C-alpha cells in the first residue's frame, strides 16, 4: 500500500485538491495500490478563501471516512495529514493540510532584511526587484510576482513539515505537484519544490528515496480572466498572464525538462474561455468558483497513479500529457463530450454522489416517514442519527460543498453541466442529462411509481436492511454502505 | 367454525325474534362460509398490500384503504352467501308486514361480517404475524 503526496501550490493548488477530494468522495479510486492521499497546500496566504474552503472540505471528508467503516466506494480513499501519518506528537507541526511557511507575514523587503544589506547588495536587489516588490505585503501571497515567490518559497525545505514529509516517505510512494504558471505562488513554487525534492540532502531521512521517487505535476496555463485587474493601481492584471506563462515555460524548459530525472509526468491544462473572476488580492476574498479544468487537474492525479508503474520504469524520461474534450462548440459539456477514459472514470462516481445528494435533499422526509426497516426498524437508522455530527456537521455539509462545486462548474465557462437540477422526489432519477428514464404506461396514468421516482431507492434500501447483512455495522457505516450499494445499482441502470 | 361463529353473530340480536332465520343460516353452514370468507379475504388482501403493492408513500392511508376494501368485499361475500341460502330465500318469499324482515337480517349479518373483517385484518397487522414480514416498505405499518 502506497501514499501519494499531493502538493497544491497557491490558490489553484487548493482548488484542484478540492476537486480531487470531491472525486475521491464520489468513489474515484487511485490505481497501483495508492490507498492514502496526503494533501499538502503551500500558500503563504493563510486566510485565502480557496485554501480555507479546501481544508474544511478535507476535514469533513476525514471525519466521514473515519466513521464509515471499510470497503466503501463513497469516501473510500484515506486522506491523511502528515501528523496523522506519523501518529506521533510533533508539537511544532499542526494537524492540518497546510504546509507551514515561516516569516511570510511581513513585507518582502523585511523578509530579505533590505535595510540591513550593504550598498552593493542593495544595488543588486534594486536590479531584481521593484520598489513595489519590496513593499509587497506577503500575507496575501505574492500577487502574481514569481520573482518574490522564488526567494520566499526556497525556504520550505527547512520547515518542520518538509522534514516530516521526508521522515514519512517510503519507497513506492509518489509525489504530485499542482501549480498555475500565470500567477506568483504557483509559478515560482513548482520548480523550487521540484529542485528540493530531487536533491539528495544527507541531513534529511529518506532524502535519497525521495530524490529517486516518481514525481508528476500538473501546470495550469491561463484559464480565467480578471476583468477588473490592472485598473486603478491593482497589482494583479490578467492581461499579463500569457506573457508570464511564456516566461515561466521558457524557464521550465531549461530548469526542468533539460535535466535528467527531473519530472516523470507533466500534465498541461489550459482553456480559451470567457471565465471571469472578481478581482481579489488574496485572503477570504480569493474564493474562485470551481472550474471544469480543475477537475481535469484532479483527473491528472488519478491518471498519474494509473500510469505509475510505467512512469517509474522510464527512469528520468518525462512523459508529457495534455487533456482534451470533444468540441463543445461553446455549449455545455456533458458526459458525452468527454473522452472514453475520462467518461468511464467519472460518470458513474459523480452520478452516484449527485444522486445521493439529491436524494437527501428531496427524498429524505419521505424516507423518514416510510414504515420500512430503514427508518422504523431496530437494525435501521433512527431519527437521532440525523442530528448527530456525522450526518449534520460532516456528511450533509460535505454534500452541500459538493453541490456548490457542481453548480460552480455548471455556471463557469467552460460549463460542465452533466446533471439537471430541477428534480423532485417523483422525478429524482431523471437527473443525468440525456439519460432520462422512460415512463411506463401505468405511471403515465398515475397508477404506480414512475421509473424515475425516489421510491425505488427507498424500497431497495429497505430490502438491504431486511436482509440483515449490515446488522453488525455502526449506524454511520450502515447509512453510507446502504446508499453506496443501492445508489450504485440505480446509477448503472440510468447510465446504461 | 359454523358453531363458533353462530355464537358471535347471535349475541348481536334478540335470539327469540330471529331464531328461524339463524336456524336457516346455521343449517346450511352459512356462518362457517362467512367465517372462511372473512379469514381468507382478510389474509389475501393483506398479502396483496404487504407483498405486492407495498407502497412507499402515503402508507398509513393506503393501509386503511385496504382495510376498508377488505370490509366491503367481506360485506359483499356475506351478502352473496346469505342470498344463496335456501331457508332465507324461502323466508324472503314468505315475508309479509309485521314479520322479521329477512332482507334487513342479511344486511345486518353482512355489516357485522364487515366489522369482524376489519377487526381480523387489524389484528393481523398489529400482531407480529408473518403477513407483515412479507413487506420491505411496510414492515412497521401501522406500527
Image (cartoon, coloured by chain):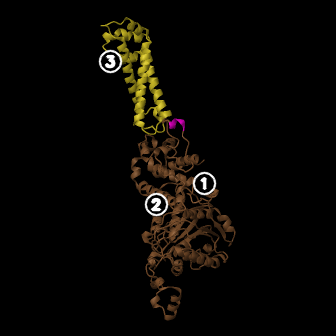
Residue B41 picture location, percent across and down: 46, 24
SS at mark 3? loop
Q: Which residues are magenta?
A: A440-444
Q: Give the farthest residue toward the bottom.
A: A119
Q: Which residue is mark 1?
A: A336
Can residue A72 be seen? no
Q: Is residue B6 above or below residue A393?
A: above
Residue at mark 2 = A60
**Whole-percent x and y of residue A356?**
49, 51
Q: Is residue A324 visible?
A: yes
Q: Nearer the viewer, mark 3 or mark 1?
A: 1
Q: Mark number for residue B12?
A: 3
Q: Which mark lies nearer to you, 2 or 1? A: 1
Disc 3 and disc 1 in contact, CB within 8 angstroms: no
Q: Is residue A278 above or below residue A348?
A: below
Label 1: element kind: helix
Respond whether the residues carrying marks 3 and 2 are from the same subunit. no
- What is the drawing colour of chain B? yellow
Secondary-structure class at tag 2: helix
Who is closer to the viewer here, A49 or A159?
A: A49
Callout 2 crowding tier (Cα within 10 Å): few <14, some 14–19, many ≥20 = many
Mark 3 crowdedness (10 Å alpha carbons): few <14, some 14-19, many ≥20: few
Amino acid at each position: 500500500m502506497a501514499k501519494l503526496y499531493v502538493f497544491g501550490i497557491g490558490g489553484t493548488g487548493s482548488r484542484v485538491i478540492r476537486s480531487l477530494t470531491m472525486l475521491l468522495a464520489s468513489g474515484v479510486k487511485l490505481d497501483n495500490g495508492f490507498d492514502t492521499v496526503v494533501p499538502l497546500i503551500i500558500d503563504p496566504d493563510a486566510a485565502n478563501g480557496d485554501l480555507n474552503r479546501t481544508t474544511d472540505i478535507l476535514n469533513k471528508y476525514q471525519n466521514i471516512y473515519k466513521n464509515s467503516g471499510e470497503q466503501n466506494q463513497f469516501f473510500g480513499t484515506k486522506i491523511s495529514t502528515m501528523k496523522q501519518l506519523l501518529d506521533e506528537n510533533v508539537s511544532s507541526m499542526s494537524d492540518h493540510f497546510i504546509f507551514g511557511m515561516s516569516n511570510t507575514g511581513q513585507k518582502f523587503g523585511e523578509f530579505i532584511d533590505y535595510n540591513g544589506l550593504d550598498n552593493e547588495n542593495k544595488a543588486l536587489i534594486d536590479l531584481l526587484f521593484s520598489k513595489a516588490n519590496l513593499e509587497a505585503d506577503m500575507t496575501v501571497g505574492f500577487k502574481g510576482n514569481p520573482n518574490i515567490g522564488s526567494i520566499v518559497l526556497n525556504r520550505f525545505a527547512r520547515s518542520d513539515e518538509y522534514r516530516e514529509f521526508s521522515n514519512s516517505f517510503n519507497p513506492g510512494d509518489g509525489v504530485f505537484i499542482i501549480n498555475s504558471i500565470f500567477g506568483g505562488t504557483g509559478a515560482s513554487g513548482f520548480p523550487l519544490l521540484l529542485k528540493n525534492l530531487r536533491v539528495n540532502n544527507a541531513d534529511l531521512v529518506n532524502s535519497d528515496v525521495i530524490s529517486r521517487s516518481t514525481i508528476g505535476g500538473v501546470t495550469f496555463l491561463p484559464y480565467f480572466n480578471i476583468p477588473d485587474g490592472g485598473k486603478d493601481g491593482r497589482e494583479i492584471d490578467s492581461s499579463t498572464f500569457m506573457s508570464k506563462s511564456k516566461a515561466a515555460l521558457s524557464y521550465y524548459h531549461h530548469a526542468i525538462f533539460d535535466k535528467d530525472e527531473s519530472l516523470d509526468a507533466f500534465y498541461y491544462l489550459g482553456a480559451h474561455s470567457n471565465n471571469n473572476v472578481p478581482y481579489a488580492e488574496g485572503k477570504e476574498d480569493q474564493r474562485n468558483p470551481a472550474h471544469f479544468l480543475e477537475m481535469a487537474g484532479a483527473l491528472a492525479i488519478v491518471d498519474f497513479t494509473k500510469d505509475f508503474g510505467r512512469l517509474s520504469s522510464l527512469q528520468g524520461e518525462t512523459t508529457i500529457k495534455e487533456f482534451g474534450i470533444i468540441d463543445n462548440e461553446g455549449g455545455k459539456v456533458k458526459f458525452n463530450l468527454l473522452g472514453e477514459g475520462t467518461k468511464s472514470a467519472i460518470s458513474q462516481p459523480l452520478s452516484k454522489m449527485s444522486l445521493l445528494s439529491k436524494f437527501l435533499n428531496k427524498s429524505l422526509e419521505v424516507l423518514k416517514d416510510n414504515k420500512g426497516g430503514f427508518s422504523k426498524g431496530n437494525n435501521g437508522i433512527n431519527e437521532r442519527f440525523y442530528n448527530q455530527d456525522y450526518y449534520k456537521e460532516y456528511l450533509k455539509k460535505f454534500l452541500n460543498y459538493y453541490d456548490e462545486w457542481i453548480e460552480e462548474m455548471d455556471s463557469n465557462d467552460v460549463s460542465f453541466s452533466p446533471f439537471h437540477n430541477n428534480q423532485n422526489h417523483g422525478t429524482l432519477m431523471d437527473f443525468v442529462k440525456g439519460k432520462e428514464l422512460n415512463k411506463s404506461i401505468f405511471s403515465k396514468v398515475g397508477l404506480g411509481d414512475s421509473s424515475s421516482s425516489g421510491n425505488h431507492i427507498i424500497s431497495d434500501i429497505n430490502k438491504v436492511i431486511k436482509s440483515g447483512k449490515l446488522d453488525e455495522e455502526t449506524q454511520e457505516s450502515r447509512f453510507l454502505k446502504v446508499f453506496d450499494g443501492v445508489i450504485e445499482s440505480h446509477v448503472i441502470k440510468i447510465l446504461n | 367454525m359454523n358453531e363458533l361463529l353462530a355464537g358471535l353473530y347471535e349475541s348481536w340480536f334478540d335470539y327469540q325474534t330471529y331464531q328461524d332465520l339463524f336456524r336457516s343460516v346455521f343449517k346450511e353452514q352459512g356462518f362457517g362460509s362467512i367465517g372462511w370468507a372473512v379469514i381468507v379475504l382478510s389474509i389475501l388482501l393483506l398479502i396483496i398490500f404487504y407483498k405486492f403493492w407495498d407502497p412507499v408513500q402515503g402508507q398509513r392511508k393506503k393501509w386503511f384503504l385496504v382495510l376498508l376494501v377488505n370490509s366491503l368485499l367481506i360485506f359483499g361475500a356475506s351478502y352473496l352467501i346469505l342470498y344463496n341460502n335456501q331457508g332465507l330465500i324461502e323466508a324472503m318469499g314468505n315475508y309479509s308486514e309485521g314479520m322479521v324482515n329477512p332482507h334487513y337480517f342479511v344486511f345486518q349479518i353482512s355489516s357485522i361480517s364487515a366489522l369482524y373483517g376489519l377487526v381480523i385484518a387489524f389484528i393481523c397487522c398489529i400482531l407480529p404475524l408473518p403477513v407483515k414480514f412479507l413487506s420491505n416498505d411496510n414492515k412497521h405499518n401501522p406500527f
